Image (cartoon, grey):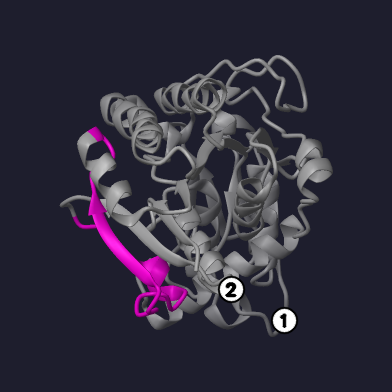
Amino acid sequence: MKKALITGVAGQDGAYMTRLLLDKGYVVYGTHRQGGTTDFWRLSELGLHDHPDFHRREHDLSDLTACIGLIAEIMPDEIYNLASLSFAGSSFGQAGASTQINGIGAFNLLEAIRQVNPGIRFYQASTSEMFGKARSFPQNEDTPFCPRNPYGVAKLYAHWMTVNYREQHDIFAVSGIAFNHESPLRGPEFVTRKITNGCARIALGDAEALLLGNLDAKRDWGCAQEYVECMWRMLQADVPDTFVLASNRMETVRGFAHRAFEAVGIALAFRGEAANESAAIDAIVPDSLAAASGLRTGQTVIRVSPDFYRPAEEVPLIGDPGKAGKKLDWHPRTSLDDLCRSMVAADVRRNQQRIPA
């Protein structure tokens, strides 16, 4: 049985990767931060807590000696470095921690592999935030990087270290430059999950309105489960490389909100612009979830707050996954409509059952 080490096992990608590898017959070791109050709700939702081939470990990625010891003990065949302070907006206030975990943490793992067993295959979770103020569209593996926040800067350091260890030390180290990828396990601090959870609560009569930032901001949103599958494919390839993981489609925050509210039977009408924009209920589908909650047409359900605006929002990030398609036979399949509906359905269920997530 192959053994895999997954850092950041409590996160969205970590949980889905754990399930994928267990289904493929791996023994999986998942790490999470030392101390603190790590929440394993995602692993619980996937029913993985008690799997006999899954083992959790506390670990400090910023400690090189600890990384060497952990890898020497487990001797994994594959390492998936998915641990991250992954909310780009908050990285401005956590620049030091972002540098240590997102940047130095990757270096420590690579150096530990070099010292313990250079035959271990390594996946680095890179990000579209490294493109930042992109100069060409869509972005691919040859697009120049220009990160605009500490999260992107730290991830770029980790990316180049991955390339360096691949070229200088002949380690099978790959970098997946992932654009935004969503799922029912997305954290509530991300705008898609904020929308789907807020929409569910409004439809159930538990909330009145949702506060959002720039509704014109555009994102390349894909399906997290599919992206995790591509990460695995990268480590099964004959040659290590760098790949963009993206859907090659863009949608505005406004468009995603439209889809979410449609999923509960609410048609929205937007009015105003920029910070003065809002959305009210234009119509309610009979016999829908929203119809049973006493909502009324004309009721405002979305308001815009400048507090949620981010720098460089005017720069659209859209990825070209063509290389992954040609070399890994990977192609995004889930439509944004289906992805959004699955997230809304999960949040409706959680709110009905009073399950915090």
Whether residue 85 is in magenta: the answer is: no
The answer to whether residue 63 shows anywhere in this view is no
Would residue 107 be found to the left or right of residue 281 on screen?
left
Callout 1 amino acid: Pro
Q: How far apart in space, not on screen, are marks 1 and 2 (Cα)?
A: 18 Å
Would residue 75 be found to the left or right of residue 218 on screen?
left
Image spot of residue 235 (x, y percent): 60, 47
Whether residue 49 is in magenta: the answer is: yes
The answer to whether residue 20 shows anywhere in this view is yes
Residue at 32 percent across and 35 percent down: it is 101
Looking at this view, is 93 or 40 the one in front? 40
Looking at this view, is 283 or 232 the one in front? 232
Image spot of residue 247 (x, y percent): 74, 45
Would residue 313 be found to the left or right of residue 154 on screen?
right
Callout 2 amino acid: Ala
Residue at 65 percent across and 22 percent down: it is 315
Return the mark for residue 286: 1
Q: Quadrant of the C terminus?
A: bottom left
Q: Which residues are magenta?
A: 37-64
Question: At numbered mark 2, what does the secondary structure look like: helix, strand or loop?
Answer: helix
Q: How many marks?
A: 2
Q: Please identify, in this view, whether the residue under mark 1 or under mark 2 is nearer the observer.
A: 2
Residue at 49 percent across and 31 percent down: it is 309
Return the mark for residue 345: 2
